[in-house]
Amino acid sequence: MADQIVETDARGRASLGRPGRRYLMHEESDGTLVLEPAVVVTELERRFLANAALQAQINYARAHPEQRVRRRARRTQ
């Protein structure tokens, strides 16, 4: 059986977790079902988390606010 995402219902059924939690479920060779807590992220977030250089740039910018370049506000017409 391929891994599946399982989400509990409002009463917490389908797993031993709290209501609304998500799990990645897979089946062991002996038939045991294993539920692993899971978080679903968007493709964009996954790409960001995989880009260490971009994260370093953002962290540097946050640590050095004095280097920010001030920009003029756009006028609305």
Image (spheres, rainbow, N blue to C red):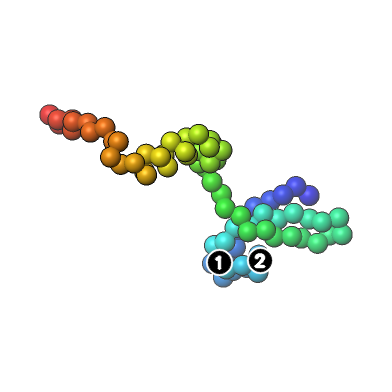
Identify which residue is drawn at 40% across, 40% down.
Answer: 60
Q: Element at badge 1?
A: loop
Asked which quadrant contains residue 17, the reply is bottom right
One can see residue 2 in this view: yes
**Can you name the residue that lies furthest to the right here?**
30
Q: Label 1: how many residues lie within 10 Å, few (<14), some (14-19) or many (20+)?
A: some
Q: Quadrant of the C terminus?
A: top left
Q: Is residue 29 left or right of residue 22?
A: right
Q: Element at badge 2?
A: loop
**Can you name the residue that lies furthest to the left here?**
77
Asked which quadrant contains residue 70, the reply is top left
Asked which quadrant contains residue 76, the reply is top left
Which kind of residue does numbered mark 1 sit on?
Pro
Return the x and y of residue 28 as percentages of the image width and height: 82, 56
Identify which residue is drawn at 66% across, 66% down.
Answer: 15
Q: Which mark is residue 58?
A: none
Which kind of residue does numbered mark 2 sit on?
Ser
One can see residue 44 in this view: no
Mark 2 lies on residue: 15
Task: From the viewer's side, name the closer residue of 10 and 15.
Answer: 15
Q: Is residue 36 left or right of residue 27?
A: left
Identify which residue is drawn at 63% across, 59% down.
Answer: 37
Q: Is residue 70 left or right of residue 49?
A: left
Return the x and y of residue 73 as percentages of the image width and height: 18, 33
Q: Label 2: how many residues lie within 10 Å, few (<14), some (14-19) or many (20+)?
A: some
Mark 1 lies on residue: 19
